[in-house]
Image (cartoon, rainbow, N blue to C red):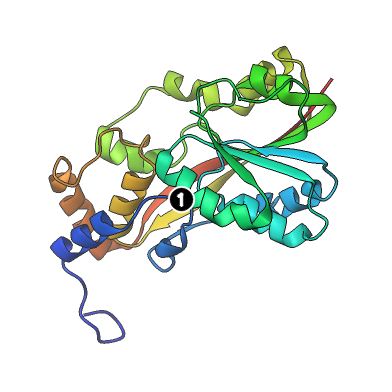
């Protein structure tokens, strides 16, 4: 029984619930009360809204379901930029972002995350992105006007790796070096950007039940590639028993704020 007298869900019930939740978009509201992540001190979405107010042509790269851009635009309306475009590579998210952002006049363009950006040179004065899989620095520089700004929140090295290594075992350090802020600074500068702000934080993440773990790994598919409930059932059961006995599973996310200007 829970402290409030209600029955605790069984392991099988939690697995079924975590496996049934839709994974499209980047709305994490389902996790409320089941998992939590401390937020970076810079407040990316609110900070983005401040930059949108001063832009005339904006591109949001890898917009997901469009939730962050929608929030930011809502804070600056009706002073939003005259042109706002977003790209997204996952078909389910393209549809979701289009439905959410079209009423705000935003065009969502289907574009694979590793493909050149389908826009002309110097088309935008602001390029933004929240958690891009891999920043294409040459493309970002190309589509920015001289003096234009890239403003983004990136996922840093070994983010939530306590959970990754719980399922996969120890992972080599070398595999996460590309996400290191210093490496990304060097790559951005080599592409012709001047980094004007770079801040990094590690933040506490808690998973309160195994359903939250299942949904998270189905949603963030690159954490444990090929994850399925069937393939990892023994580890999931052990994790369920650990959470029941000891409390939330604790991990730490890595985030960095990146602001750069095209020379």
**In which quadrant will I find the N terminus?**
bottom left
Up the image or down, 51 lies above or below 164; here it is below
Residue at x 24% of width, y 54% of height: 19
Task: Describe residue 135's horizontal placement relative to residue 32 as left or right.
Answer: right
Decide if residue 193 is in sight here. yes
Front-most of 78 and 196? 78
Above or below residue 35? Residue 25 is above
Where's residue 239, x and y in %? 23, 52
Question: With respect to residue 13, does 205 lie above or below?
Answer: above
Residue 39 seen anywhere in this rendered image of the structure: no
Q: Position of residue 175 (x, y in %)?
A: 43, 21
Q: Nearer the viewer, residue 138 or 254?
A: 138
Toward the top, the furthest residue is: 190
Q: Residues within 10 Å of mark 1 (few under 14, many from 20)?
A: some
Give how far across and how far down residue 147 sits, in percent. Answer: 86, 27
For label 1, the residue is 25
Along the viewing direction, whichever of 97 and 140 lies nearer the viewer: 97
Give the number of marks. Answer: 1
Question: Which residue sits furthest bottom?
Answer: 5
Question: Split into 4 quadrants, where in the image is the C terminus?
Answer: top right
Residue 119 figure quarter: top right
At x 83% / y 41%, what residue is drawn? 56
* Front residue (pair 250, 50): 50
| Residue occupying image coordinates x 50% and y 23% | 114
206 horizontally vs 152: left or right: left
């Amino acid at each position: 029984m829970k402290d409030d007298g209600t029955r605790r869900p069984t392991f099988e019930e939690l697995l079924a619930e975590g496996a049934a939740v839709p994974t499209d978009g980047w709305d994490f509201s389902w996790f409320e009360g089941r998992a939590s992540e401390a937020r970076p001190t810079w407040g990316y979405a609110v900070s983005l809204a401040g930059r949108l107010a001063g832009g005339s042509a904006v591109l949001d790269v890898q917009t997901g379901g469009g939730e962050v851009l929608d929030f930011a635009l809502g804070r600056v309306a009706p002073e939003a930029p005259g042109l706002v475009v977003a790209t997204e590579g996952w078909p389910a998210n393209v549809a979701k972002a289009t439905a959410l952002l079209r009423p705000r006049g935003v065009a969502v363009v289907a574009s694979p995350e590793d493909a050149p950006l389908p826009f002309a040179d110097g088309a935008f004065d602001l390029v933004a992105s929240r958690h891009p899989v891999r920043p294409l620095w040459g493309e970002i520089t190309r589509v920015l006007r001289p003096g234009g700004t890239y403003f983004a929140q990136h996922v840093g090295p070994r983010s939530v790796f306590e959970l990754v290594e719980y399922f996969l075992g120890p992972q080599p350090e070398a595999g996460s070096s590309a996400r290191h802020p210093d490496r990304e600074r060097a790559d951005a500068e080599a592409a012709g950007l001047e980094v004007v702000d770079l801040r990094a934080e590690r933040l506490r993440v808690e998973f309160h039940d195994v359903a939250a773990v299942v949904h998270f790994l189905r949603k963030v598919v690159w954490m444990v590639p090929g994850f399925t409930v069937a393939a990892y059932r023994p580890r999931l059961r052990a994790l369920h028993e650990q959470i029941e006995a000891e409390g939330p599973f604790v991990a730490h996310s890595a985030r960095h704020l990146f602001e750069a200007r095209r020379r």
